[in-house]
Image (cartoon, helix red, strand yellow):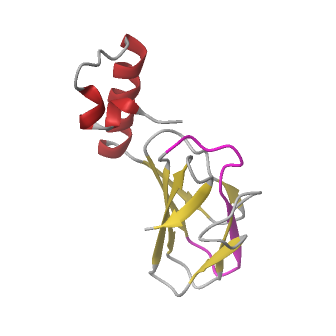
Amino acid sequence: MTRQIRDPQALQGYTPTTQQLLDSLVDVWGYVNPVVTEVTTDYTAAGSLGTEKILCNSGSSITVDLPADPSDLTVIEVVRAGTGAVTIDGNGNTINGASTQSVASQYDCTTVEWFEDISEWIIK
């Protein structure tokens, strides 16, 4: 699926629908006003439009499951604020070719973005 509203070249001679314009505004709002969630136990990311920031704050291990059916260009940031290990699980999808990824150490952050065209989470 190609999202023409995001490609300036595609707009030449193209008139987007009202829904496409609304979708692009929602996308922009998601990046300007990201969702921030602090978790202390295993968590499944909502995968809402825009950016979701997940602050993992525990001394115990936490697994963050990514959405099983994400929207194109969804961005999820996972921060390891506590001392416990943090694992990001692709939830049926892969992350840079692997089923899981780890956030290396306390205060590190791993950001992933979903690319629908290749059906893959990519670490940014």
**Which is more toward the observer, 18 or 81?**
18
Q: Which region is colored magenta?
A: 57-72
The count of marks equals 0
Is 21 situated above or below 24?
above
Q: Look at the image and say whether residue 70 sits in the magenta stretch.
A: yes
At a point 47% along the width and 36% down the height, the residue shown is 2
At a point 64% along the width and 76% down the height, the residue shown is 101
In the rendered image, the quadrant that contains the C terminus is bottom left
At a point 62% along the width and 75% down the height, the residue shown is 58
At a point 70% along the width and 79% down the height, the residue shown is 60
Is 17 situated above or below 49?
above
Is 109 situated above or below 12?
below
In the rendered image, the quadrant that contains the N terminus is top right
Q: Look at the image and say whether residue 45 sits in the magenta stretch.
A: no
The image shows residue 65 at horizontal and vertical percentages of: 69, 59
Q: Is residue 25 left or right of residue 40?
A: left
**Which is more toward the observer, 90 or 32?**
90
The image shows residue 102 at horizontal and vertical percentages of: 62, 79
> Furthest-top residue in view?
18
**Magenta stretch: helix, strand or loop mostly:** loop
Is 8 situated above or below 93?
above
**Which is more toward the observer, 116 or 40?**
116
> Furthest-front residue in view?
13
The image shows residue 53 at horizontal and vertical percentages of: 47, 57
